[in-house]
Amino acid sequence: MPATTSALDVTGLWKVFGPSGRGGSDGIVGTPLAELPAAELRRRTGCVAAVRDISFEVRRNEVFVVMGLSGSGKSTLVRCLTRLVEPTAGTVLLDGEDLAAADAKRLRELRRNRFAMVFQNFGLLPHRRVIDNVAYGLEVRGVGKAQRHERAREVLDLVGLTGYEDYYPDQLSGGMQQRVGLGRALAVDPDVLFFDEPFSALDPLIRRDMQNEVIRLHREVGKTLVFITHDLHEALRLGDRILIMREGETVQLGRPDEVVGAPADDYVRDFVADVPRSQVLTLSWVMRPPAPDDPMDGPELPPDMVVRDAARVVLSAGAPVRVVRAGELLGLVDSEAILRVTVAEDGAPAPRTQTAAVGG
């Protein structure tokens, strides 16, 4: 196991599309042109900066979501991370290894063994059975048929497709086809899984089922996931942390409760205006400091418990609930604080009862 705590480290990443040469795509980064707004940069150089000086880390075994509207640069970003698109500048480290320094042979090895992608369009081989689609990555590695089929059956059971081994893709629903794509990615046992808007083409009910599937699989197999989406509710539901992009730049990076509870600007504030706060904010956002006359015999709850899940305990308690972590009293939550969030979920910012949220 590598000593680093990060699966991915991204620093100063740029991707500029447009003509090369003096003043072109390879003459923008590090110059005053890089500071120009997108429209002015395009007018003066004919170039588009799809990714602009992005830096972040993806922690091992977390679900890291990149969210933004169409044209925000999120899909270009994930393609730069896997070098399906060559970055203009910056570094991407996979467990400390610089992907930009990888030659074609090493890059093939990394794609076969270290990371895998799940796309929106599934990318299944129509003339091959489900079991052979799932086993395809292992076949490319040179794994024998019996061994790769054994592994494929294990993965098909994991993604809920046992019994469909001999079906062809066109015999399956869209949701089942996406499960095949997910199984194909899991079969090679990658360290990092990249999802590029994989559920966008699915209807809402199937999409929710697939989100549940990702949550379940993450609990069971514990992979590092980088998930691209334009859907805020999907981002909040899946992400341990969320990177919000606009015009190629980072707008905010934080946990779901941080994005909802403390939006970085009006752009994010508009995004989260209709989010039910009780389903995202944790007790650390609504607790208050203890007062000298507060009773201390109420039940204990952790600071990272979501308000909705804590509501029944708080509202039925005869005393304020103590918010405790590792034996330390962090604050108190009473019925009034819960009701401010749960009763008036009209998109207005939830009142803060503390000067700073405590990380959960």
Image (cartoon, helix red, strand yellow):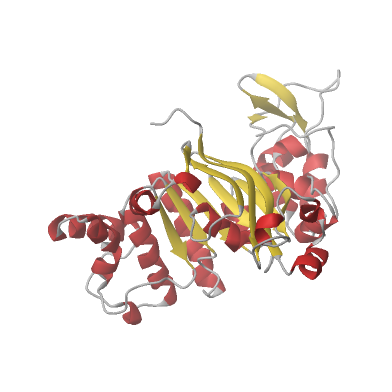
- Residue at the outermost bottom position: 170
Q: Residue at x 40, y 71 (%)?
A: 123
In the image, residue 217 lies at what x, y percent?
Answer: 42, 52
Which quadrant holds the C terminus? top right
Q: Residue at x 38, y 65 (%)?
A: 181
Q: Residue at x 81, y 31 (%)?
A: 288
Left or right: residue 24 compared with residue 238: right
In the image, residue 99 lies at what x, y percent?
Answer: 47, 46
Q: Which of the 4 image quadrants contains residue 262? A: top right
Left or right: residue 170 compared with residue 101: left
Residue 232 appears in the figure: no
Q: Nearer the viewer, residue 339 or 303?
A: 303
In the image, residue 121 lies at what x, y percent?
Answer: 46, 73
Q: Which of the 4 image quadrants contains residue 178? A: bottom left
Q: Nearer the viewer, residue 135 or 338?
A: 135
Residue 58 appears in the figure: yes
* 87 lies above or below 287: below
In the image, residue 273 lies at what x, y percent?
Answer: 80, 59
